Image: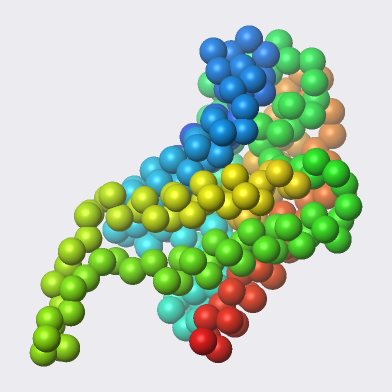
Amino acid sequence: MTPFVAEMLGTMLMILIGDGVVANAVLARTKGHAAGWMAITTGWALAVFVGVVVAGPYSGAHLNPAVTLAFALTGQFAWASVPAYVAAQMAGAALGAVLVYLAYRDHFAATDDPAAKLGVFCTGPAIRDYKFNFLTELTGTFALLFIIFYITGGELRLPDQATTLPIGLGSVGALPVAFTVWAIGLALGGPTGYAINPARDLAPRIVHTLLPIPGKGGSDWSYAWVPVVGPLCGAALAALLFLIL
């Protein structure tokens, strides 16, 4: 598996499960209809876990252009590889969104609310105030990246200070990132739906625009810059603070 394929598949699985849990909670006549915010935030946390488990050994499991940008800014990732990673993330997110649509096609048709249909694919503000919506996305992504910088692979340094022994838990080592996303969703997800990932929002929004969903309404492109620019700025600030410290 190449890093490009790993990023694409990991992001696809993340969106399949993350957007899938939203579809299950908000679309009409599903088994999980009206499951609520706890189900959505938990589902998204587990979606990140699954994506990291699959892509981690091969690409580092960025799954997010903001993560890729932050690691490039801190010198932990090559700038030359940034375009390929972002392209893979966008492609994977789009594919995952299409799969969610196919799985819930009948439920999209049975749902009357265009906002609910759009909410399966991308985020939107609870109260539309662009400056504070932007600040919320910036803050959430800042927290995500700053915490990620301090998540280690798990190793024990021996007394000679030159030898380390791995003490990680394999795939279970993806749990800290999942818990971080879960915490951010519970704490900061209320105002904007916590995109904290440009690919997670932009690619599915494009899919929403292109798919023949009955009664879907618009894709709210006037808001679309917020979950793209906000996370990128938050990632840059997290990288800057990490370098300073």
Instruction: Give me the residue at 85% from left, 44% from top.
Output: 127
Rendered-image quadrant of the N terminus:
bottom left
User: Dividing the picture into quarters, in which one does residue 103 lie?
Assistant: top right
Q: Is residue 46 left or right of residue 18?
A: left
In the image, residue 7 lies at what x, y percent? 44, 54
User: Dividing the picture into quarters, in which one does residue 229 lie?
Assistant: bottom right
Instruction: Give me the residue at 74% from left, 26% from top.
Output: 116
Vertical relation: 61 (above or below) 109: below
Q: Is residue 96 visible?
A: no
Image color mode: rainbow
Q: Nearer the viewer, residue 129 or 93?
A: 129
In the image, residue 47 lies at what x, y percent? 46, 41
Instruction: Give me the residue at 80% from left, 41% from top.
Output: 126
In the image, residue 214 lies at what x, y percent? 77, 18
User: Dividing the picture into quarters, in which one does residue 162 lie?
Assistant: bottom left
Q: Nearer the viewer, residue 216 or 74?
A: 74
Q: Is residue 173 left or right of residue 199?
A: left
Instruction: Give me the residue at 51% from left, 87% from top.
Output: 245
- Total marks shown come to 0
Vertical relation: 126 (above or below) 225: above
Q: Is residue 67 visible?
A: yes
In the image, residue 146 lies at what x, y percent? 53, 70
Vertical relation: 142 (above or below) 213: below
Q: Nearer the viewer, residue 6 or 228?
A: 228
